Image (cartoon, helix red, strand yellow):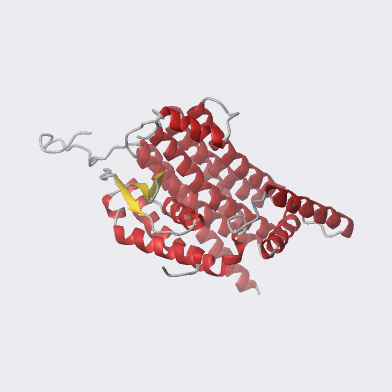
């Protein structure tokens, strides 16, 4: 129920932002389209935690702000490596273990690895990811473990 | 009020300049790096940090309007789709059997070509 | 002042797009080209955004939004086509074909 209400709110705000209308007759069309979208979602039976990840924004937003700092640091390293007059890199393909209970946490963790410049998730396996790194300085296991812990905490809310 | 507008403009220009520098550095990296898997990283710099910085700079210019909300939406969509597309390209190349370069890439010096790896 | 900064940003974005076109034409493998096309699309979105603020027409932002979505879908569609040689294939068939081919490299 809470998922349906929050999804309707988000859809309504998005309709309003994208159209920019404020007349009451036109807003009625927006309400109708939101209702149609909700009915479709209910028929597809995909209304659950993974369709509506908005309820964990209070932990996801600090997580992505922290990730922004990591991205800035890694970007500087990648730019330095790419702009050196003589390119001197040692690419690595490493296997990163994943500790996550839910699919959402796994997804956020894989997405975070790809978002951080210098590391890309190449293949998803049962309990590990195959990660390609631009240089050996990007493959510290502690960094991945820290990111995994934060991602799991931000999506699941527990510290296991 | 005028000094606030000036501060806003200067902040916007600074963010825009840094974002454009990241985008250009990413483009140069895509040309220069030796291997497909390493080029992904250079393109990733462009797609994530450079794009977000430019979107934030434009949001500062737009002020507190509906336009800023739309710009935020564009930034959000880029933030979600670009790592997914990057992973899709990398995964497709990996499945197709494209082997990554894993040795040290270093341009050979003219004086010690015997000891340096040529790749 | 702001206009000049935006104009410079548009020109820099066009320069980055030209560099990316070089990789698109020179790329040794198909995946280099797909990566360059995707990155080119991202830069197109940014150029549209800056340009629409430069000329003061907010419609460009809507077009940029659409372009971002279409760029993502096109990348996925190209990759799907070149892996399965068909677009009319469902997720269930994909995993079935993967199992038949023994695709575990």
User: Residue A62: where, in percent of width, then height?
Assistant: 50, 68
Q: Nearer the viewer, residue A124 or A18?
A: A124
Q: Is residue C1 visible?
A: no
At a point 38% along the width and 51% down the height, the residue shown is A127
At a point 53% along the width and 55% down the height, the residue shown is B52
At a point 37% along the width and 35% down the height, the residue shown is C104
Q: Nearer the viewer, residue A117 or A62?
A: A62
User: Residue B32: where, in percent of width, then height?
Assistant: 35, 38
Q: Picture quarter containing residue A57?
A: bottom right
Q: With B19 as the anchor, is B68 left or right in this view? A: right
Establish if C60 lies above or below A105: above
Establish if B1 lies above or below B25: below
User: Residue C63: where, in percent of width, then height?
Assistant: 68, 44
| The furthest residue to the top | C85
Establish if B91 lies above or below A43: above
Q: With A117 as the anchor, is B102 left or right in this view? A: left
Q: Nearer the viewer, residue A139 or B119?
A: A139
What is the total number of numbered labels drawn onto the structure image? 0
At a point 75% along the width and 51% down the height, the residue shown is A39
Indicate the quadrant containing the C terminus of chain A: top left, top right, bottom left or bottom right. Answer: bottom left
User: Residue B76: where, in percent of width, then height?
Assistant: 58, 55
Q: Is residue A154 visible?
A: yes
Indicate the quadrant containing the N terminus of chain A: top left, top right, bottom left or bottom right. Answer: bottom right
């Amino acid at each position: 129920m809470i998922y349906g209400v929050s999804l309707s709110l988000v859809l309504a705000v998005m309709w309003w932002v994208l159209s920019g209308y404020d007349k009451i007759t036109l807003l009625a069309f927006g309400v109708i389209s939101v209702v149609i979208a909700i009915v479709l979602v209910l028929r597809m039976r995909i209304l659950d935690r993974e369709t509506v990840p908005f309820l964990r924004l209070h932990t996801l937003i600090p997580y992505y702000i922290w990730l922004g700092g990591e991205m800035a640091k890694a970007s500087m390293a990648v730019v330095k490596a790419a702009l050196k007059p003589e390119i001197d890199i040692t690419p690595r393909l490493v296997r990163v273990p994943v500790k996550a209970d839910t699919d959402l946490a796994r997804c956020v963790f894989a997405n975070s690895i790809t978002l951080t410049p210098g590391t890309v998730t190449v293949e998803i396996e049962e309990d590990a990811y195959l990660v390609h790194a631009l240089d050996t300085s990007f493959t510290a296991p502690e960094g991945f473990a820290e990111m995994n812990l934060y991602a799991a905490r931000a999506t699941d809310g527990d510290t296991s | 009020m005028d000094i606030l507008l000036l501060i806003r403009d200067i902040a916007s220009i600074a963010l825009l300049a840094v974002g454009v520098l990241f985008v250009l550095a990413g483009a140069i990296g895509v040309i220069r790096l030796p291997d497909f898997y390493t080029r992904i990283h250079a393109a990733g710099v462009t797609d994530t940090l450079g794009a977000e910085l430019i979107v934030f700079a434009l949001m500062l210019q737009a002020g507190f309007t509906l336009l800023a909300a739309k710009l935020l939406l564009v930034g959000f969509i880029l933030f979600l789709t670009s790592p997914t597309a990057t992973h899709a390209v990398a995964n497709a190349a990996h499945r197709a059997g494209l082997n990554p370069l894993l040795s040290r890439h270093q341009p050979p010096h003219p004086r010690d070509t015997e000891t340096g790896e040529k790749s | 002042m702001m206009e000049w900064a935006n104009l410079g940003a548009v020109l820099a974005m066009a320069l980055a797009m030209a560099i990316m076109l070089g990789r698109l034409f020179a790329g040794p493998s198909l995946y280099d080209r797909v990566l360059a096309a995707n990155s080119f699309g991202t830069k197109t979105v940014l150029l549209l955004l800056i340009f629409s603020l430069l000329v003061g027409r907010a419609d460009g932002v809507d077009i940029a939004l659409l372009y971002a979505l279409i760029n993502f879908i096109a990348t996925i569609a190209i990759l799907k086509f070149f892996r399965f040689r068909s677009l009319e294939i469902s997720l269930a068939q994909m995993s079935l074909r993967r199992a038949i081919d023994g695709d575990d490299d």
